[in-house]
Image (spheres, grey):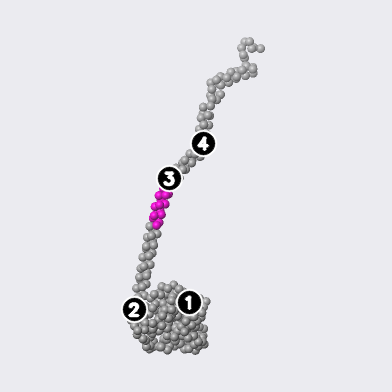
Amino acid sequence: MADSPKYAATSNPATQSNRLETWGNATTMNLNNLLYQNIQTSAYFKSLYAFKTYHEVMAEAKTKVDNLEPFLKGHMASSAFCLLLKFWTLRLTVKQVNGLLKNPDSPYVRALGFLYLRYVCQPSQLWDWYEPFLDDPEEVTLCCGPAPKVTTIGKLCVSLLKDMKFNGTILPRIPVPIARKIQEKLESRRESSSSSRSYDNRSDYSRRQRRSRSRSNSRSRYSRHYRGYRSRSRSVSRDRRHGSGRSYRRSYNESTRYKPSRSRSPYGRSRNRSRSRERGTTQGFPLGEEGEL
């Protein structure tokens, strides 16, 4: 576990505003004893003695850190926590911590800045540091392996404010009154964000409903007009298409109806009867006294 807090001497922020107010053990940085000892015996941490400035250590962190695990295999200290303790030996200022939190090149440099604050910053100031970043969507890898665990900067900040452990190592304890206030602020913030999301959803739904109603009205007016136009055009085209056939059938029916035929004409019937009589006389029917044989 971390050592009991031994508050480090800090300067008055009114006179030295760039000085970060710290608390706890000035030697171990409030790290877990096992983790601190492994960092001290790490060959990589000893190689960091060559870096003397803040910018050199930050450049090293950009290239060496790709996860936030405190231990490697065999309980060896990770490069991330070795660099974290190296930052502590430099006693970062407020401006330098802001440079870590807002670093545009590496999300892991930003994560080291939040871890630095969680270990050494005054607990009463943690909310003011973390609150602007609680919705930050940039992703970082917490653990490597076959199934790496990935989170965002915002969720990392919430976890550091709420939890007592980070990746299997114990964090320094936040006093109960301050922890209770932080929890209340997180809950109120969550409620306000959920209510704003529900309001946005309702407004989006109402806008979609109005848009759909306006579209349906315009489409219905258009469809009524279009249906009337189509019915008229269909009737006209049908008349045009079938008019020639009907006129032809009408003329044909009239011609067949009023065409004089031999069977209907009285002249044709009398002519047919006379011809039948003539055929009968030639076939042996009596023609009178003069025609007797």
Q: Earlier in the sequence, mark 1 or mark 4?
A: 1
Q: Is residue 65 visible?
A: no
Q: Earlier in the sequence, mark 3 or mark 2?
A: 2
The residue pinned by badge 4 equals 244
Q: Which mark is residue 67?
A: none
CB-based contact (under 8 Å), mark 3 and mark 4: no
Residue pictured at 38% horizontal, 78% vertical: 129
Residue drawn 38% across the image and 64% down it: 201
Mark 1 or 4: the one toward you? 1
Query: Mark 1 and mark 2 in contact (Cβ < 8 Å)?
Result: no
Mark 2 or mark 1, earlier in chain: 1
- Amino acid type shown at disc 2: Lys
Q: Mark 2: give few (<14), some (14-19) or many (20+) Cα within 10 Å.
A: few
Residue range (magenta): 211-228
Residue 208 picture location, percent across and down: 40, 59
Q: Is residue 212 magenta?
A: yes
Q: CA distance from mark 3 to mark 2?
A: 70 Å
Residue at (35% x, 84% y) in the render: 15
Is 168 situated left or right of 190 in this image? right
| Residue at mark 1 | 106
Give the amino acid at mark 3.
Gly
Q: Which residue is mark 2?
A: 181
Q: Which marked residue is nearer to the observer: mark 3 or mark 1?
A: 1
Mark 3 to mark 1 CA distance (whole Å): 66 Å
| Cβ atoms at labels 1 and 4 below 8 Å apart | no
Badge 4: few (under 14), some or many (20 or more) residues near its Cα, within 10 Å? Answer: few
Evaluate whether residue 242 shows in this view: yes
Looking at the image, is mark 2 or mark 4 earlier in the sequence? 2
Q: Secondary structure at mark 4?
A: helix
Which residue matches tag 3? 228
The amino acid marked with disc number 1 is Ser
Q: Nearer the viewer, residue 54 or 80?
A: 54
